[in-house]
Amino acid sequence: MKIAIVEDEYLASSYLKSILEQQDILQIAEIAVLKSVKEAVAFFSENNVDLAFMDIHLGDGKSLEIFEKTTISCPVIFVTAYDSYAITVFKHFTIDYLLKPFEEQELFEALIKFKKIKETFNSDGALQSLVAIENPETSKIQRHFLVNHGYKLISINEAEITYFAASGKHLFIYVNSGNSFLYNSTLTDIINNLDPFTFFKINRKYIVNRSTIKEVVKHSNQKIELILTVPPIENDAIILSKKEITNFKNWLDQ
């Protein structure tokens, strides 16, 4: 197994590298230490690794720039000193984060989590995480949704929403009363505007509100059904996408 550490502080990278070399959770053959955006871009353009640790701030820029200039296909564990909102975003989109200064046990827990989910983890959200944090003005959370209701316009507060549901080419907002409203967007677009703590895109058809989940039924390791406090469209069983199972469990654990 190959690991990359993207960290410009010598003491920090040495501390992390030392622990990784001494632990026995993962069998590591090689550890590459990259000290800058420039080094990381050059490295990832020519090499693949199984896992990367990344600091957010580097001497010549920020980690976001690495994702913009080359492709990183491996899972990422961020090493950060960001606030609680940023941590919520990281927990929603990445394997884990380490909040500086971190203890050995915290690192071990992150490695164990990686070991369990490395085969199914989808790391596409890593760039979205960084974009959301680095560009807060362009990623403000949407709290109200304007819809048509007869001859009136209604503004729906996020607290009233039980779930978003896609039906054909249309998106509908379902509220506590059981009513539904057509909304001009798509699941793919709307999820980027929602509070990541409150809402989760469980499959291609549904985004659910945390407060709407009544039960989580585990039929098997690869089949999990959600029972909501309000009935779903056409009373269909709501099955969690297999690739989202681990991310969903992490989200519920916040």
Image (tube, grey):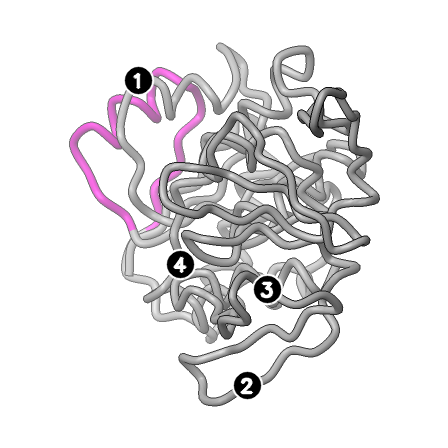
Quadrant position of residue 195: top right
- Label 3 is placed on what type of residue? Pro
Q: Residue at x 33, y 47 (%)?
A: 74
Callout 4: SS: loop
Which comes before the other along the chain, label 1 or label 2? 1
Which comes before the other along the chain, label 3 or label 2? 2
Quadrant position of residue 183: top right
Q: Residue at x 40, y 58 (%)?
A: 121
Which comes before the other along the chain, label 4 or label 2? 4
Magenta stretch: give its range: 31-49
**Mark 1 or 2: the one toward you:** 2
Q: Is residue 83 above or below residue 39?
A: below
Residue that carries the numbered disc 2 in the rendered image: 218
Task: Judge from the rendering whether residue 63 lies leftward or rightward of residue 70; answer left or right.
Answer: right
**Mark 4 or 2: the one toward you:** 2
Q: What mark, if any, has residue 121 been given in the picture?
A: 4
Q: In this view, does 139 lie above or below 52?
A: above
**Mark 1 or 4: the one toward you:** 4
